[in-house]
Amino acid sequence: MRQLLAMTRIWLVVIELTWLVGLAGCGASQASNTVRPDVLRIAYTEEAESLNPITSGDLTSGLFQDCVYESLALRNMHDPDELLPCLAEKWEFDEERLEYTIHLRRGVMWQAIKLPNGVELPPRELTMRDVKFTFDCILNPHIPASRRGDFEDLQATDASQRYKIKLDVIDSHTCKIRWNQRYFLAEESILMGPIIPRHVFSVDADGELISLDFSSKEFADGFNVHWANRTMCGTGPLRVEHWRRNERLSLARNADYWGEPFHFKRLVFVCEPNSFSLLQKLLHQELDWADIDQKDLYLQNRHHPEVEAGRVVLKEYNYPGYRYLGYNLRRPLLHDKLVRRALTQAIPVEQIIQVVFNGLATQVTGPFANQSKAYDQSIEPLPFDLAAARKLLDQAGWVDSNHNGTRDKIVDGGRVEAVLNLTIEANSSQYLSVAQIIQTNWRQIGVRVDITPVQQALMTQRMRAKDFDAVLLGWSLAWHADPYNTWYSGNAALPDTSNTIGYSNPEVDKLVTELRVTFDKKKQREIYHRVHRLIYDDQPYTFLFSEKQTCGYHGRLQDVHLYAVAPCVDYREWSARPGR
């Protein structure tokens, strides 16, 4: 899971939690005489934090970087359970030694790049020095690496056991990575992250070495503000031309790319934060692809003349993520499972889907991608039933003893009112609409709700401090999710894990621990389903729905497939009339 980031980002315009891995390719409209037909124009709505793939974690950064940087392997979008060779031409796994042997593809060249002083660093071959350097940066405790959690043991008491891997370079194109414990996502963790060039990120703006100790604070201080954070030097099919913040990023086809060439000569990412303007540009073929965050705008334009004529295609697709109402289980009212089940049965999820999201969502029952094998399709959601919710609250001992319209109960010698503060992100009409529907229905079962919209920064602070009653949020999901960070009880008291609600179930703990050391796919699926069922029975979240993403693209594009795994598209497949 892309956790603290994803739980806020899933609500934003692009709504794509976790990191984008596809590379873009398509052409411009024949109907527009202002853009050449070999230029692809992709919309984005918020500027990237950085172009450094080690430290950045926002979606736009990932979108930009994945057009230039590459990883050792790629996910097969047609079969997400399979990884395909990329920078690594092959790898072997010794299960007894928990050791991967990775063989780099030969002849892969880093693109040329200029230092800030104008001196050019010429192309050079990718080697294992770059791979080791990448992992050294990820494991440097002074670098805010977004992927370091994949390799950290949060329960380790010995500093020497903090990291679960050890990388040894065998020769220029071979290395061995040994894990010190079994981990079911070990292969994805080491193969799926972008590799960065040592000869670029190890030197300062004048080309002088920052430090030979890549684990030191001295090196980290230089790396964290590195000049290459504002440009890119990769091995991919595209290279940077120029980046104007809050305006556009222009990439050109890499003529020396080792693999299949990109279908188009140039890719331009265009910043357009206004949803209405974005849609108008799409309908006038000034953009080739855009996600449409406003469902009402999408629905209103399904029969637009440009859509009817086939010059613009509007589509909806499933995105791996879900929205939920999370309960702070430390609160007296929310500690009882019967109360949480009552609250869930008092939320009209289907009404919310129809009224707020125009039917473009699917109700969900658990914490895994509902298109994946981890999700148990046999689990039926609790029905919306206010009478049943009232009975559950009565059974839990919450009654309106003082006849003020709000239930109460004596807890630890004091009377506690059934009053909850529901925290939502500000500046979202959808958040507010969902919260108001919940507020209205909970009032009918004797639970009072106060809605508090807050900005994203304050939301994050409150989550980390566990200072909330209930929150309305969302997760975007990895295809193979590790439930440990969010659902293992030992993480509830830790500051930087996703178990902010304080969830604890010994049986779930046991299963999550077992899952992490299980390599057998069939057994993994069985464990996932048991975890799913137990969590849904506990109702620490009210699992709401998985929202459909809506998008539009130029009608001349060909081979546009929409997949169940993020980022749901693979731009490298796309072509257009006329072709390359």
Image (tube, rainbow, N blue to C red):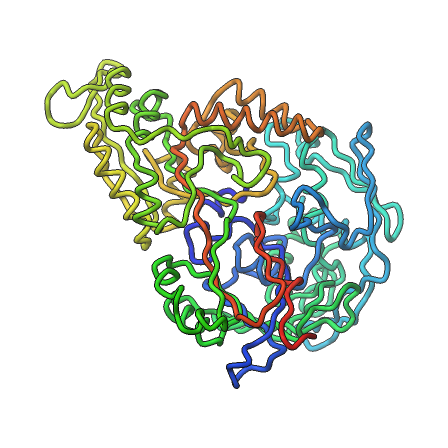
Q: From the viewer's perspective, is residue 517 above or below residue 360?
A: above
Q: Quadrant of the N terminus?
A: top right
Residue 88 appears left or right of 425: right
Q: Position of residue 320 (x, y in %)?
A: 52, 45
For residue 324, above or below residue 512 = below
Q: Residue furthest left?
A: 403
Number of callouts: 0
On the image, the x and y values in percent for residue 34 come to 52, 85
Comparing 323 with 124, the one in front is 323
| Residue in front for this viewpoint, 78 or 144 | 78
Q: Residue drawn at (23%, 26%), measured in percent from left and top?
A: 418
The answer to whether 556 is drawn above or below residue 139 in the figure is: below
Front-most of residues 365 and 10: 365
Image-based side of 91 in relation to 442, left or right? right
The residue lying toward the viewer, choosing from 406 and 27, is 27
Q: Quadrant of residue 95?
A: top right
- At 68% from the left and 75% from the top, the residue drawn is 579
Q: Residue at x 36, y 47 (%)?
A: 458
Identify the residue at horizontal 37%, vertical 28% (top origin): 382
Q: Which residue appears farthest toward the front when viewing the image?
A: 309
Quadrant in the rendering for residue 263: bottom right
Query: What x and y, as percent, mark residue 165?
Result: 73, 37
